Image (spheres, rainbow, N blue to C red):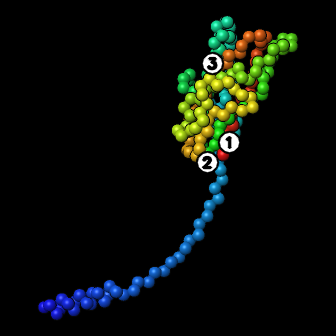
């Protein structure tokens, strides 16, 4: 019986020692990745490709206390509920990016006569609300707008669609003639 078991063990060892052969094939793959970034106001006027808010951003100053303390500017007509981030955006990017606000140096004025004391863009104070998770360099609350460029926040890497908002506060100061003051603020997201 020992001889049969030993013969079977030698036979199994002989089969196990047989060399294996392998065939290899390589598949070369490639893809072209373009950097993609999308910044969209949540409340648009509905026109395709138009990234402007539905109404205009405004408020009316009627008292000295309002001049002293300033007022939050609101979307008119009010499309979004008042709350966290008066002006809301969505953003998505395949890579890291910066979000910057720019504007002309001064508000334009429409009223009677000639304007004697222009209102600077820095009268606007901006606050980022709910920057996307992982954002860095988030603008401190109530930072004056620098017309040359105010970084709202940066993000070191891409992410899927995220919501964020911005509050806009105006403290005009004194000496400005009555009338309508207008300042276009451009929000730009740029890949880094």
**CA separation in Å, label 1 and label 3:** 27 Å
Residue 81: x %, y % from top left: 55, 23
- Give neighbour class at mark 1: few <14, some 14-19, many 20+ (Cα, 10 Å): some
The first of marks 1 and 3 along the sequence is 3
When the figure is inspected, residue 110 is found, relative to residue 86, above or below; the finding is: above
Give the farthest residue toward the left: 1
Q: Which mark is residue 95?
A: 2
Numbered disc 3: secondary structure: strand
User: Which mark is first along the chain, 3 or 2?
Assistant: 3
| Residue displayed at 67% across by 18% down | 170
The Cα atoms of the two marked residues, 2 and 3, are separated by 33 Å
Residue in view at x 65 percent, y 40 percent: 98
**Which residue is most to the top?**
64
Residue 78 location, x and y as percent? 61, 22
* Left or right of residue 15, residue 118 in this image: right
Q: Which residue is mark 1?
A: 190
Residue 122 in percent (x, y) is at: 71, 23
């Amino acid at each position: 019986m020992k001889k049969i078991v030993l013969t079977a063990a030698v036979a199994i060892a002989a089969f196990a020692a047989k060399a294996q052969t392998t065939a290899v094939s390589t598949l070369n793959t490639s893809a072209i990745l373009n950097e993609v970034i999308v910044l969209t106001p949540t409340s648009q006027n509905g026109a395709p490709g138009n990234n402007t808010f539905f109404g205009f951003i405004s408020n009316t100053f009627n008292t000295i206390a309002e001049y002293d303390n300033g007022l939050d500017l609101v979307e008119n007509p009010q499309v979004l509920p008042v709350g966290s981030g008066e002006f809301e955006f969505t953003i998505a990017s395949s890579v890291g990016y910066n979000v910057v606000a720019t504007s002309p140096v001064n508000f334009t004025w429409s009223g009677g006569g000639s304007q004697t004391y222009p209102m600077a863009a820095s009268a606007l104070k901006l606050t980022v609300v709910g920057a996307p998770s992982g954002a860095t360099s988030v603008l401190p609350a109530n930072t004056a707008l620098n017309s040359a460029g105010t970084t709202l926040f940066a993000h070191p890497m891409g992410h899927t669609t995220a919501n964020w908002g911005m509050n806009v506060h105006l403290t005009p100061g004194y000496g400005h003639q009555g009338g309508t003051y207008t300042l276009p603020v451009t929000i730009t997201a740029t890949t880094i």
